[in-house]
Amino acid sequence: MWFIRFLKSSIGKKWIMALTGCCLVLFLCSHAAGNATLFVGIPLFQAYADQLHSHPLIVSVLSKGLTTIFAIHVLTGILLTLQNRNARGQKYKVQKRAKTRNNSQAAATMIYSGLFIMLFLVLHTSVVSFGDHGKIGETIQQLFSSFFVSIFYIIAFTALALHLSHGFWSMLQTFGVNHPRYERLITVSTYAVPVFFLLLFSSMPLLILFGIGN
């Protein structure tokens, strides 16, 4: 079938990466909005968590769906990397960046930043999923009170920002958003989006680490 052949092709895999990546970015926006309650205080964050887990069926469906999307994204990324290396004998690169966008370092390290993010997510979800949701606020406060945990968390979101810097641009290119008229907007957004998530998520452990979040 043409659809199966398309999915097996390099272009098909890029579309899978773009679509799953878009879903993950949308989840990241939702996750950021929920976690932003930490800026108000631990009690509000706990209330948000309690409200969220008061709908176990929705949480279960969304978590399983998100896990599936993430697994497809990771597996397709690995297959695309291997396919590109075999075909061209070089590291992962979706396509050349516009002259005004120099992000070869992010492009060259996509597979490594992606694997590090996966390691972080395994550790992060093990704490959240298997912990006591009724005391998740206390758990987060205890974790972020540790200097090393907070630093690891910040490093993980630095890796995410690096990954997004190239991934967000690649997603837009795959979707055909590459008109010269929007080149400046695309360039700005591929920096602004990763930096926004980096600053937002990194500030959370810092607030608690330095006692502001108490």
Image (cartoon, rainbow, N blue to C red):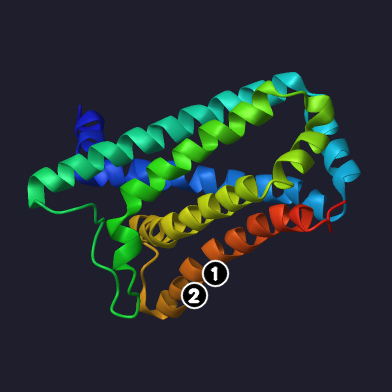
Residue 47: quadrant of the picture: top right
Q: Nearer the viewer, residue 97 or 141?
A: 141
Q: Is residue 28 above or below residue 2?
A: below
**x then y, percent, for residue 54:** 82, 24
Labelled pair 2, 1 in contact (Cβ < 8 Å): yes
Which of the numbered marks, if any, corresponds to residue 57? none
**Residue located 26% across and 56% down the image:** 94
Q: Circle 1: is it few (<14), some (14-19), or many (20+) Cα within 10 Å?
A: some
Is residue 83 rendered to the left or right of residue 148?
A: left
Q: Is residue 207 above or below residue 126?
A: below
Q: Residue furthest front?
A: 147
Helix, strand or loop at mark 2: helix
Is residue 103 rendered to the left or right of residue 126?
A: left
Is residue 156 rendered to the left or right of residue 139?
A: left
Q: Nearer the viewer, residue 71 or 159?
A: 159
**Residue located 42% across and 55% down the image:** 163
**x then y, percent, for residue 135:** 83, 29
Q: Circle 2: is it few (<14), some (14-19), or many (20+) Cα within 10 Å?
A: few
Three-letter residue code for mark 2 = Val
Rounded to the nearest whole Å, what is the CA distance between mark 2 and mark 1?
6 Å
Q: Is residue 81 above or below residue 204?
A: above
**Residue located 78% across and 26% down the image:** 133
Residue identified by numbered label 2 = 188
Residue identified by numbered label 1 = 192
Three-letter residue code for mark 1 = Ala
Residue 197: quadrant of the picture: bottom right
**x then y, percent, for residue 154:** 58, 54
**Residue located 71% across and 58% down the image:** 206
